[in-house]
């Protein structure tokens, strides 16, 4: 091995193709979709669905053992998540809100991939691998009274032995693509619920709720600060009945102090957090590129060899934006490569996510400031990037929660020792 | 292929340095800082690890392994032990690397064998100049058309008794920065009193005056072709960023361990978020700076343009190390302020990084 940062050629080519998608189907409608919240990015969805679908189909073919991929390709080290990181970065460079409308299994896919049985993967993910109509997946964890402390959730799942079904009751909020998954496509949402409130974390399990399930309804569609092209909804479960084998992981409540099931569910964050950081990187790069372009029009360029006293305040700010971006890029790269290499990356995932949230906030807020009165207008996209960027420090664990996780890891503390 | 794993040889080297840094450098750091000198046998042991000799080209008897990546890995590991001693051990590189990279055949053959000796050659380089507005691209030291070197240099490490000084100066005729190999005892070279600095106190540095020092064309590094000065600055930026990571990590690990054993209000202070979050931010920014340093070093080794990456890594690391060392003192509270403990020394050393241009190179 040797230290190397070079992105494989085929991923660079994929990224270039995605740049075209971003320019032609995202940047062109970014402002309109922000102004007309909740409208759908049709051209983007139609362009991306066949690509995503075919990738999913080839992943499932591998699972079936019917893959037609050459052995050589199958045996080389995985770059799946690295490719995903750069895909998300480029799509978010196009538009972060529209990127979230990408028709794919999303976080539901990550959960099913990491916790589901082979049977569940094949049964539940097939819908993302076929057909002309796009399909979405979503993840429902947060509740009105349970945010970062998701172990205190109160949505319940009770097993009905007569009908061999789980019965869900409760309300989940802040579900990205919940409406697209359950009302506008034949998708699914992963729902976290407790099978035994007294058991605390050990009682929390995740369930797959499919479109068309009786007793499931979309509640509020949120009106947001940013990522307005993406729908964020609440879902109400009123005696919602789902098949017995739609539970992910074991149904048993383990007596041990740390439940394996809950940890398994939490492990999906290790995969999803670097991808949120990737999205932040895309918005950050868009902002930095735009700022530099506008400054250049006014004769201000950014030097990389001057001493501090020869830099203007604006140059210092831009250099700091670039350095912060580079730090997040490399932390994120490390976290995703660890996933591809099947190494535990909980610390590194939280590191890149915590840094990304703060950096993107700094970068985009600076961008608006540096461009003066024009930066603040809705004629340009920088003000939108600032609003879009802010979410990256909030969802998939706030910056504070991720900093707490980093702190626990480096100190070797449990959540009891460092609360 | 993206990878964060050093080669086996590099890992072995780092393990060796880690032991030396803890058992030798760290052990002597306090007394060296107070007395103003690291014991010669400690420096000699560092020299014998062979970092500089291995970078000398094979045809001259070295291993031909001048690698910026190996350099940053070694720099971080050494600086974790002690910054003053590290800079002293690495001072010969300030001459060896530019000569290896840009020297003419004659310059390489006459100078590079010096670096294969059992003992480090006493040589140094003079880049920094006194003054608030130092700019490496606008040196006040000049070389006149008829070969006279004039100017004042600062922070010249180990200048006293040096056989050769590599002096950077502005050329009168083409407004470029050039480097000249000047004998330490050339007429007109005045080594002034040892400088008094806030930190790196075990490293002897000097202000050096050049009064109409006559240098001939053969002394011009690289001959008619000269040097790629920006590339050398890149190598300095990367080296300093790596050293900053080492110092910051020393401060971080010490503060982390202290915070876990220091009990107040009935529990270790690390169990307070106010302390734990400082440590978490230190850890994140140390890793960030290290990765930026590695990225720039990889580009240098690949022969790619690395100016932007080196500059950003240095800028980030300069700020990071100050914050990490300040947090280190803060977490130790009163003990952080006492010279018996290392935290305040790291803060004094850490503050210097923006001013250390020219003191290290990979």
Image (cartoon, grey):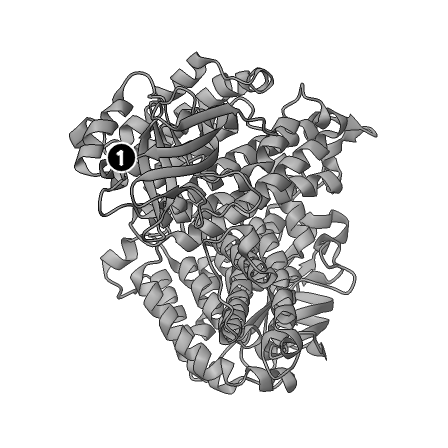
Measured along the vertical axis of the image, is residue A150 above or below residue B214?
A: below
Q: Residue A416: which quarter of the image?
A: top right
Residue A67 visible in this rendered orientation of the protein: yes
- Tell me the chain of label 1: B
- Please state which of residues B133 and A181 is positioned toward the viewer in this rendering: B133
Q: Which residue is mark 1?
A: B65
- Please state which of residues A100 and B7 is positioned toward the viewer in this rendering: B7
Q: Residue B301: which quarter of the image?
A: top left
Dot 1 crowding, Cα within 10 Å, few <14, some 14–19, many 20+: some
Can you give x and y, in whole percent of width and height, for residue A300 in the image? 51, 69
| Horizontal relation, residue A25 to residue A317: left or right | left
For the point 44% across and 59% down, the residue is A118
Can you give x and y, in whole percent of width and height, for residue A18 in the image? 40, 74
For the point 39% across and 19% down, the residue is B161
Measured along the vertical axis of the image, is residue B318 above or below residue A30?
A: above
Can you give x and y, in whole percent of width and height, for residue B218 in the image? 22, 36
Q: Residue B330: which quarter of the image?
A: top right
Measured along the vertical axis of the image, is residue B317 above or below residue A36?
A: above
Residue A412 visible in this rendered orientation of the protein: no
Measured along the vertical axis of the image, is residue B199 above or below residue B132?
A: above
Q: Quadrant of the C terminus of chain B?
A: top left
- Please state which of residues A20 and A161 is positioned toward the viewer in this rendering: A20
Can you give x and y, in whole percent of width and height, for residue A241 in the image? 66, 70
User: Extreme right residue here?
Assistant: B265
| Horizontal relation, residue A41 to residue B173: left or right | right
Count of numbered circles in the view: 1
Label 1: state its secondary structure: loop
């Amino acid at each position: 091995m040797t230290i190397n940062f070079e992105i494989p050629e085929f991923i660079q080519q994929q990224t270039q193709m995605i740049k075209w998608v971003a320019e032609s189907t995202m940047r062109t409608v970014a402002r309109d979709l922000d102004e007309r919240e909740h409208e759908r990015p049709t051209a983007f969805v139609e362009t991306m669905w066949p690509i995503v679908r075919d990738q999913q189909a080839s992943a499932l073919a591998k699972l079936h053992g019917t893959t037609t991929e050459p052995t050589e390709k199958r045996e080389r080290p995985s770059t799946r998540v690295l490719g995903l990181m750069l895909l998300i970065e480029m799509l978010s460079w196009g538009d972060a809100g529209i990127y979230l409308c990408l028709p794919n299994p999303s976080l539901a896919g990550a959960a099913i991939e990491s916790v589901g049985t082979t049977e569940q993967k094949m049964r539940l993910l097939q819908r993302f691998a076929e057909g002309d109509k796009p399909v979405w997946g979503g993840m429902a964890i947060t509740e009105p009274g349970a945010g970062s402390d998701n172990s205190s959730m109160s949505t319940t799942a009770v097993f009905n032995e007569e009908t061999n079904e789980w019965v869900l009751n409760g309300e989940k909020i802040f579900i990205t693509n919940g409406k697209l998954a359950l009302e506008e496509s034949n998708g699914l949402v992963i729902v976290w619920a407790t099978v035994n409130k007294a058991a605390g974390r050990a009682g929390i399990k995740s369930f797959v709720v499919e479109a068309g399930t009786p007793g499931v309804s979309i509640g509020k569609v949120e009106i947001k600060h940013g990522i307005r092209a993406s729908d964020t909804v609440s879902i109400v479960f009123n005696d919602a009945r789902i098949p017995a084998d739609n539970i992910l992981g074991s149904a048993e409540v383990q007596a041990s102090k740390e439940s394996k099931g809950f940890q398994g569910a939490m492990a999906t964050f290790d995969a999803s957090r670097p991808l949120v950081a990737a999205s932040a990187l895309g918005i950050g790069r868009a902002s930095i590129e735009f700022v530099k372009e506008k400054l250049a029009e006014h004769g201000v360029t950014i030097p990389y060899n001057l001493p501090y006293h020869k830099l203007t305040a604006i140059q210092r700010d831009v250099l700091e934006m670039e350095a912060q971006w580079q730090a997040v890029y490399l932390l994120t790269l490390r976290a995703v490569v660890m996933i591809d290499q099947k190494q535990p990356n909980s610390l590194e995932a939280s590191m890149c996510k915590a840094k990304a949230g703060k950096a993107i906030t700094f970068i985009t807020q600076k961008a608006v400031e540096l461009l003066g009165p024009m930066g603040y207008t809705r004629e340009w996209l920088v003000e939108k990037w600032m609003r879009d960027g802010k979410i990256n420090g909030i969802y998939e664990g706030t910056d504070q929660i991720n900093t707490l996780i980093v702190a626990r890891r480096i100190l070797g503390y449990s959540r009891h020792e460092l609360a | 292929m993206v990878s964060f794993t050093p080669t086996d040889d590099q890992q072995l080297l780092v393990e060796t340095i880690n032991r030396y840094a803890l058992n030798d450098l760290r052990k002597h750091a306090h007394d060296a800082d107070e007395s103003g000198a690291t014991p010669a046998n400690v420096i000699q042991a560092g020299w014998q690890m062979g970092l500089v000799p291995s970078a000398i080209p094979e045809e001259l008897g070295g291993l031909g392994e001048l690698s910026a990546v190996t350099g940053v890995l070694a720099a971080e590991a050494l600086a974790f032990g002690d910054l003053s001693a590290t800079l002293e051990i690495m001072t010969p590189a300030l001459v060896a690397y530019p000569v290896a990279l840009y020297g003419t055949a004659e310059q390489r053959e006459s100078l590079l064998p010096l670096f294969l000796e059992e003992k480090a050659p006493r040589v140094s380089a003079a880049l920094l100049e006194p003054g608030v507005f130092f700019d490496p691209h606008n040196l006040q030291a000049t070389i006149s058309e008829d070969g006279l070197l004039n100017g004042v240099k600062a922070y010249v490490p180990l200048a006293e008794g040096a056989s050769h000084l590599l002096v950077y100066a502005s050329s009168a005729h083409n407004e470029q920065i050039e480097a000249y190999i000047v004998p330490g005892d050339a007429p007109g070279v005045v080594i002034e009193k040892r400088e008094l600095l806030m930190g790196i106190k075990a490293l002897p540095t000097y202000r050096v005056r050049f009064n109409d020092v006559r240098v001939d064309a053969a002394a011009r590094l690289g001959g008619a072709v000269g040097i790629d000065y920006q590339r050398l600055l890149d190598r300095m930026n990367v080296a300093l960023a790596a050293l900053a990571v080492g110092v910051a990590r020393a401060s971080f690990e010490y503060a982390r361990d202290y915070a876990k054993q220091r009990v107040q209000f009935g529990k270790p202070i690390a169990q307070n978020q106010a302390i734990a979050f400082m440590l978490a931010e230190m850890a994140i920014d140390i890793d960030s700076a290290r990765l930026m340093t590695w990225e720039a070093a990889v580009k240098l080794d690949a022969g790619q343009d690395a100016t932007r990456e080196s500059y950003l890594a240095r800028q980030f690391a300069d700020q990071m190390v100050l914050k990490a060392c300040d947090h280190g003192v803060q977490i130790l509270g009163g003990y952080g302020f006492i010279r018996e403990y290392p935290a305040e020394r790291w803060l004094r050393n850490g503050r210097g990084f923006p001013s250390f241009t020219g003191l290290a190179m990979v």
